[in-house]
Image (tube, grey):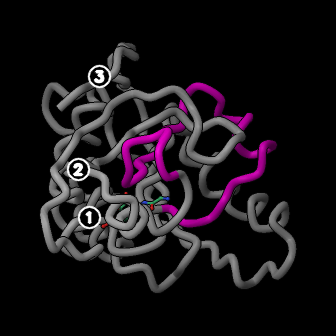
């Protein structure tokens, strides 16, 4: 059975979908949900689901990314994860941190990568006049939002869409895609999932 740690920064709706899916014949189990924000609503949701939680406030390490990551590593390594899932984790991780977990850290990003790495993906897709948008799950490598793609799902961009409306349409697909990718990845299968 693979051990999965999930890193979040906010509401944790993707985290919850992953946790809910890791039951029964699933090849993995959640061992930790950790956040850089002690007030992240997802922490309480994880605790209510019976998953151990940890918080390391990045604001306690101004200008010291390495110090923050060293503090984050303590609960993370103690949980002995085989796989780490970033699920709405909004801190950029250093190459040092990423390379510790090479080939076993996943991220979900709300665009059809390689389009629109970084922030404000939905506004950028609307602004560009794109006919479709979507979500990507990929392996984390030192370059931001650029690792091998493990799954994508597409949605239409509709006339009059606001970034919020498009985000909601994409999020519904995120909730289908991430569990499907993790299930496959934890079983040792890295072929991309296409929904
Ligand atoms: C999700 O839309 C996720 O794709 C995005 O943050 C949201 C978190 O929602 N992630 C990124 O933008 C990463 N750069 P959640 O906390 O409800 O899962």
Q: Of the residues under marks 3 and 2, which one precedes in the sequence?
A: 2
Q: Residue at x 57, y 32 (%)?
A: 147
Q: What stretch of residues is rendered in magenta? A: 89-116
Q: Secondary structure at mark 2?
A: loop
Quadrant hosting ligand 1 = bottom left
Q: CA distance from mark 3 to mark 1?
A: 20 Å
Secondary structure character of the magenta stretch overall: loop
113 on left or right of 57: left
Residue under label 2: 131
Where on the picture, by quarter, is residue 191? Answer: top left
Q: Say few, some or many: other residues with alpha carbon within 10 Å of mark 2 (under 14 / 14 to 19 / 20 or more).
A: few
Q: Secondary structure at mark 3?
A: helix
Q: Is mark 1 within 8 Å of ligand 1?
A: yes
Q: Position of residue 93 (x, y in %)?
A: 69, 54
Where on the picture, by quarter, is residue 95? Answer: top right
Q: Say few, some or many: other residues with alpha carbon within 10 Å of mark 3 (under 14 / 14 to 19 / 20 or more).
A: some
Q: CA distance from mark 3 to mark 2?
A: 29 Å
Q: Please indicate, yes or no, whether residue 116 appears anywhere in the rendered image.
A: yes
Q: Is mark 3 within 8 Å of ligand 1?
A: no
**Front of the two marks 3 and 2:** 2
Q: Say few, some or many: other residues with alpha carbon within 10 Å of mark 1 (under 14 / 14 to 19 / 20 or more).
A: some
Q: Residue at x 46, y 86 (%)?
A: 39
Q: Residue at x 50, y 42 (%)?
A: 84
Discs 3, 1 touching: Cβ within 8 Å: no
Q: Residue at x 17, y 38 (%)?
A: 23
Q: Position of residue 130 (x, y in %)?
A: 30, 52
Q: Of the residues under marks 1 and 2, which one precedes in the sequence?
A: 1
Quadrant occupied by the C terminus: top left
160 on left or right of 94: left
Q: Secondary structure at mark 1?
A: helix
Residue under label 3: 184
Disc number placed over residue 13 in the picture, else none: 1
């Amino acid at each position: 059975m693979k051990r999965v740690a999930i890193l979040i920064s906010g509401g944790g709706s993707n985290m919850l979908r992953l946790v809910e899916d890791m039951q029964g014949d699933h090849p993995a189990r959640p061992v930790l949900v950790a956040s850089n924000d002690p007030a992240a609503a997802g922490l309480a949701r994880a605790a209510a689901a019976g998953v151990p939680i940890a918080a390391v406030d990045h604001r306690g390490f101004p200008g010291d990314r390495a110090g923050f990551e060293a503090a984050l590593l303590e609960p993370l390594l103690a949980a002995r994860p085989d796989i780490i899932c970033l699920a709405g984790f909004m801190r950029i991780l250093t190459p040092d941190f990423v390379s510790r977990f090479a080939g076993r850290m996943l991220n979900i990003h709300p665009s059809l990568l390689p389009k629109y790495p970084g922030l404000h993906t939905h506004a950028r897709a609307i602004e560009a006049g794109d006919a479709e948008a979507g979500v990507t799950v990929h392996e984390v490598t030192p370059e931001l939002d650029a690792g091998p793609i493990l799954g994508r799902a597409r949605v239409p961009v509709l006339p009059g869409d606001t970034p919020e409306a498009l985000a909601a349409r994409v999020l519904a697909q995120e909730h289908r895609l991430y569990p499907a990718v993790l299930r496959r990845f934890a079983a040792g299968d890295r072929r991309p999932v296409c929904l």
